[in-house]
Image: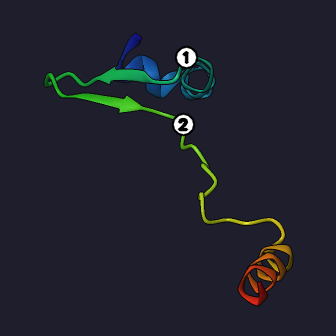
Amino acid sequence: MRVFAFSEARQNLATVLKLAQTDGSIRVRHRDGRVFTIRPETTEDSPLDIASVPEVVDSVRESRER
């Protein structure tokens, strides 16, 4: 994981964001010693997102009719 000084990250923000996207995360160290992590936000699909709800409903109805 790469670590940037705060001033360097501020001057090269676009580069830092691209590196965070490819590397997974980047750390930024502030002058007072605090460290921040920049990570891309992931958009994970919910396991409850069903592409074809009517098909599932039909399957449930068929199983109940048996």
Q: Indicate the secondary structure of the residue bearing disc 2.
A: loop
Which quadrant of the rendered structure holds the C terminus? Answer: bottom right
Local crowd at mark 1 within 10 Å, few (<14), some, or many (≥20)?
few
**Which quadrant would residue 53 be assigned to in this image?**
bottom right
Q: How many badges with numbers are in the image? A: 2
Tell me the residue that label 2 is attached to.
40
Q: Residue at x 62, y 19 (%)?
A: 22
Q: Residue at x 67, y 65 (%)?
A: 49
Q: Residue at x 57, y 28 (%)?
A: 17
Task: Give the amino acid type for the residue marked by disc 1 in the picture.
Answer: Asp
Residue lying farthest top? Answer: 2
Q: Position of residue 11 (x, y in %)?
A: 51, 23
Local crowd at mark 2 within 10 Å, few (<14), some, or many (≥20)?
some
Q: Residue at x 75, y 79 (%)?
A: 63
Q: Is 41 on the left-hand or right-hand side of 53?
A: left
Q: Are marks 2 and 1 in contact (CB under 8 Å)?
A: no
Task: Give the amino acid type for the residue marked by disc 2 in the picture.
Answer: Pro
Position above or below: 3 against 58: above
Q: Is 50 on the left-hand or right-hand side of 55?
A: left
Q: Position of residue 52 (x, y in %)?
A: 84, 70
Q: Quick one: 56 or 28, which is closer to the camera?
A: 56
Sequence-earlier tag: 2 or 1: 1
Q: Position of residue 12 (x, y in %)?
A: 55, 21
Tell me the residue that label 1 is attached to.
23
Q: Indicate the secondary structure of the residue bearing disc 1.
A: helix
**Which quadrant would residue 51 be assigned to in this image?**
bottom right
Position above or below: 25 against 48: above
Q: Position of residue 19 (x, y in %)?
A: 58, 18
